[in-house]
């Protein structure tokens, strides 16, 4: 019996699982460009210009709010808070978006806080996309949309922004990249469940005009399609351009979820506080995904972001507002980078918004300027 027991023990130690372990929904989505580039940059000690985050400090009013929340007397801020968003944060977000959208919002049902905009996107795709649904994605796009659609069982359908280079030899702007209206219309069918809109766009920096958004809105209404509107760069818009919210266009509120990020808004990407604003009929399904995955987001970060928004609500539109100052500062940096790249023979596409800048390096690689 002793021998038999040890035999079976060694057998069980050696036995490898032979059945497939990976869920089918993960097939083909295991690669991630950021995982690869961050590793390459670390291995070769290179500057990583690929990922969108600031190299300057977050504003003091925000970091001070975090310190106060951490060290102040309210020990409850170290505990779980409301699952769908810390009450002070959902309340101030509702007040803020009431102003931006010109409609009444209920903080408890029209706003949900997430672990960054990334989890907001995940909740949208899981809650709203079914097996066999098609989701239109405008190219070029933030890479995670495609695997997130596939993971939900959906099929991504791509439509490109096409470049129309200026004839006068000027540098191209992200505004010169446009949708072909007929091509866009041809992508909508009875299988289309949603379109992902990202304005201002990562990586081109394109800020969609009211006319362009009107075209998308018209097609959404005509084909009864949802709009997942990723607006994380809403405050990073340059040259006096205006960020138009598609949810404010006719017929769109009821079918749009707006996604935002405190990381981008307050230059604190490591805090990972994001949100979704939209009608309860859509958000109630996002809450189901949230309560069955993340459930709570970090309380102290939410408290500090709430205080940041309270300050911004008071200073709304004033020169001291961070949302007024940040784009001014970044516009100067953009101009400097455009000049530098142009100076060495690359062809930068001038972004109208965001942290990003795409440059055409085809000439540069052929005959590098010195
Ligand atoms: N959407 C876009 C377009 C982004 O560029 C990013 C971050 N790079 C996110 C969403 C995710 O934002 P967060 O860090 O708040 O999760």
Image (spheres, rainbow, N blue to C red):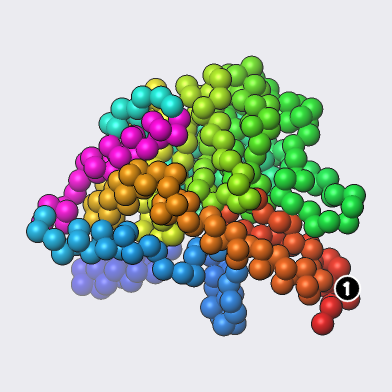
Classify residue 231 as left or right of residue 290.
Answer: right
Q: How many marks?
A: 1
Q: Looking at the image, which residue is at 48% across and 56% down?
A: 325
Q: Looking at the image, which residue is at 66% across and 47% down?
A: 206
Quadrant of image for the C terminus? bottom right
- x, y (%) of residue 106? 31, 27
Q: Is residue 98 above or below residue 44?
A: above
- x, y (%) of residue 363? 86, 68
- x, y (%) of residue 29? 57, 51
Viewer-proximal residue, 81 or 336?
Answer: 336
Whether residue 55 can be seen here: yes
For label 1, count other residues whose C-alpha is less than 10 Å away and answer few (under 14), some (14-19) or many (20+). few
Label 1 sits on a secondary structure element that is helix
Stretch in magenta: 75-101
Instruction: Confirm if mark 1 falls within 8 A of ligand 1.
Output: no
Q: Is residue 183 above or below residue 39?
A: above
Viewer-proximal residue, 33 or 164?
Answer: 164
- x, y (%) of residue 218? 64, 21
Residue position marked by numbered label 1 in the rendering: 366
Q: Is residue 229 above or below residue 68?
A: above
Classify residue 63 as left or right of residue 235.
Answer: left
Residue extending farthest to the top is: 222
Classify residue 278 as left or right of residue 78.
Answer: right
Q: Is residue 69 magenta?
A: no
Q: Is residue 77 magenta?
A: yes
Viewer-proximal residue, 75 or 152?
Answer: 75
Q: Looking at the image, which residue is at 54% across and 51% down?
A: 236
- The chief SS type of the magenta part is helix
* Image quadrant in which you'd find residue 1: bottom left
Classify residue 128 as left or right of residue 58.
Answer: right
Q: Looking at the image, which residue is at 82% across and 71% down?
A: 345
């Amino acid at each position: 019996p002793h021998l038999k027991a040890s035999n079976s023990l060694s057998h069980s130690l050696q036995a490898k699982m032979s059945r497939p372990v990976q869920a089918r929904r993960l097939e083909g989505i295991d690669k991630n460009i950021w995982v690869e580039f961050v590793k390459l940059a670390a291995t070769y000690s290179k500057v990583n210009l690929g990922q969108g985050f600031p190299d300057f400090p977050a504003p003091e009013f925000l970091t001070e709010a975090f310190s106060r929340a951490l060290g102040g007397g309210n020990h409850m801020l170290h505990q779980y808070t409301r699952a769908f968003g810390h009450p002070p944060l959902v309340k101030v977000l509702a007040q803020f978006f009431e102003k931006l959208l010109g409609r009444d919002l209920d903080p408890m049902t029209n706003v949900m806080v997430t672990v960054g905009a990334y989890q907001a996107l995940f909740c949208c795709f899981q809650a709203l996309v079914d097996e066999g649904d098609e989701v239109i994605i405008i190219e070029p796009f933030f890479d995670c949309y495609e695997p997130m659609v596939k993971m939900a069982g959906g099929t991504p359908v791509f439509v490109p922004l096409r470049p129309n280079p200026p004839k006068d030899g000027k540098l191209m702007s992200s505004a010169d990249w446009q949708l072909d209206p007929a091509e866009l219309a041809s992508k909508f069918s009875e299988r289309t469940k949603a379109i992902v809109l990202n304005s201002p766009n990562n990586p081109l920096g394109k800020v969609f005009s009211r006319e362009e958004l009107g075209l998308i809105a018209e097609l959404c209404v005509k084909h009864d399609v949802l709009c997942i509107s990723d607006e994380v760069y809403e405050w990073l818009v340059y040259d006096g351009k205006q960020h138009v919210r598609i949810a404010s266009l006719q017929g769109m509120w009821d079918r749009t979820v707006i996604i935002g990020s405190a990381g981008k808004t307050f230059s604190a990407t490591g805090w990972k506080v994001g949100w979704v604003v939209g009608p309860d009929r859509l958000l109630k399904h996002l809450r189901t995904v949230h309560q069955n995955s993340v459930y709570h987001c970090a309380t102290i970060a939410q408290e500090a972001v709430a205080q940041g928004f309270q300050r911004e609500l008071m200073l709304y539109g004033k020169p001291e507002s961070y949302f007024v100052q940040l784009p001014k500062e970044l516009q100067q940096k953009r101009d400097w980078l455009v000049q530098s790249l142009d100076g060495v023979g690359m062809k930068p596409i001038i972004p109208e918004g965001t942290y990003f800048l795409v440059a055409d390096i085809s000439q540069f690689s052929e005959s590098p300027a010195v």
